Amino acid sequence: MKHTIMLSLAATTAIMAGGNIAPIPDIKPKVQTEAEVSTGKVSGQLRGFYIDRTYSGILENNRNSLAFGGWIGYETAEWNGLSGGVKFYATEGVKIHDGPYSSDSYDPSLYGDDFDNYGFIGEAYLNYKYGNTNLKIGRQKLNTPLAGADDARMLPNLFEAAVLSNTDIKDTTLILAHVTRETVGTFGNVYGTAGALSLQSGYGLGYKEGTSGEFADMGVIALGAGTDTDGVTVGAVVYKGIEGLTLQVWDYYAHDILNAVYLQADYGWNCLLNSDVKMKASAQYINESDIGDKLAGDVDSDYWAVKLGAKYHMLSGYVAYSQTGDSDGAMNGGIITPWGGIPAFTQGMVTRHMFFADTDTWKVAATYNFKELTGLDLKATGYYASFDVGSKATYAADTDAKEAGFDIKYQATENLNLRLRANYPTDFKQGLDWNEYRLIVNYNF
């Protein structure tokens, strides 16, 4: 039956669509056509998604799901710097098994809570631009290091926020934001039960309060019902004034929970031995500390990582290493990431153990672009990650978890993208392995 479903989904590529995991957005205004200036713009993503996971080891089971959905939206023309937008998001699962929906046979990450099909107004915002300053207020999609869309299944995380940015200083972007509420995308439902695994992998202890299109307080998403807070205040500076160098400083003040500092530096240069080889070195650092009422208990956490990459014509690759410390705090030094921000150089497609306390992680990856060879806009990536989880971790302690996988992207037309992904974790926790395949059809208009 799996092969029939895969072939049927492939046949829908002419009409179905979606999008890849979104990059940090470019805050520069888009150049509008004359028609867009006068009438605004309708746009959207349609997505078809099939996922199949087979467990082995301490759990023997196969589950798979097929769903269609995406979003459609309208953005007004700009008037004296003011514009607005609204986007409707939806997911609709296909019943491909006999009997009721359950995680024994269906993968829950394409649906809402309790395998709901649902639709909702996911974005509704006003945007004002004056000179080099831009202000966006309302429901919107965010892609920042520690609060982001995590758009890896059917629907992404979305937020209620006010985001102010300015580029008056040469080569510098300043950002000030306040985020009050979040609705968790369909990926969150893969965790089943909230706990250390979800809290340190992008989803909080209360993420169920914000599923199926419901927006919940950022404190509730992080720690569960009854922990309403004043939200998360964010400040950032991004500097690109030195050739080849980008510096980022982010600070997240999650009121009465924690303060998180994120630093990243990237530097690119031509290899001294061969100018056709483009090199890139990167480093990142996260520090978290408790504040205010300490609703998450004592927090004292550090994570750092380095990455070295190279590109030669159509072939590129990198190697990365990270380390998360341990302490006497409630999370034993693990990094708390309840709002979808997963910026780690060393994360796997599904294994996000690099943020567990006392964990060392290695990752290698390589990508080949087949365009010169075949004329097709086709890219293939393979990777391998190893997670040495220490004894103080709150999940999978003393485990040597590993994950291999691949990711193939084919841009069939300007609007149509096909994607085949696979991951093969071993000892995700002691004795738990699986093979997972995803076929994604994305159409943008």
Image (cartoon, rainbow, N blue to C red):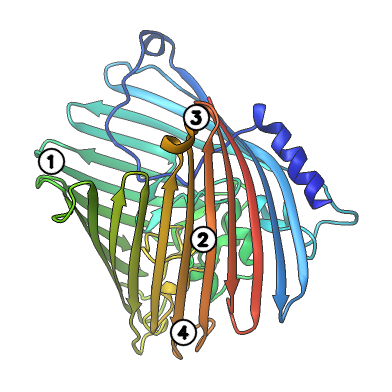
- Please, what is the three-letter code of the amino acid marked with disc 3? Val
Q: Earlier in the sequence, mark 2 or mark 4?
A: 2
Q: Which mark is residue 171?
A: 1
Look at discs 1 and 2 and give the one toward the viewer: 2
Look at discs 3 and 2 and give the one toward the viewer: 2
- Please, what is the three-letter code of the amino acid marked with disc 1? Asp
Label 1 and label 2: CA atoms lie apart by 33 Å
Residue farthest right in this picture: 98
Which residue in the protein does label 3 denote?
86
Label 3 CA crowd tier, 10 Å (few <14, some 14–19, many 20+): some
In contact (CB < 8 Å): disc 3 and disc 2:
no
- Please, what is the three-letter code of the amino acid marked with disc 4? Ala
Q: Is residue 210 left or right of residue 77?
A: right
Q: Position of residue 91 (x, y in %)?
A: 67, 41
Residue 298 higher or lower than 122, as above or below = below
| Secondary structure category for the residue under label 3 | strand
Label 2 and label 4: CA atoms lie apart by 20 Å
Q: Which mark is residue 349?
A: 2
Q: Earlier in the sequence, mark 3 or mark 2?
A: 3
- Please, what is the three-letter code of the amino acid marked with disc 2? Met
Q: Earlier in the sequence, mark 1 or mark 4?
A: 1
| Secondary structure category for the residue under label 1 | loop
Q: Is residue 35 left or right of residue 8?
A: left
Q: Position of residue 10 (x, y in %)?
A: 70, 37
| Secondary structure category for the residue under label 4 | loop
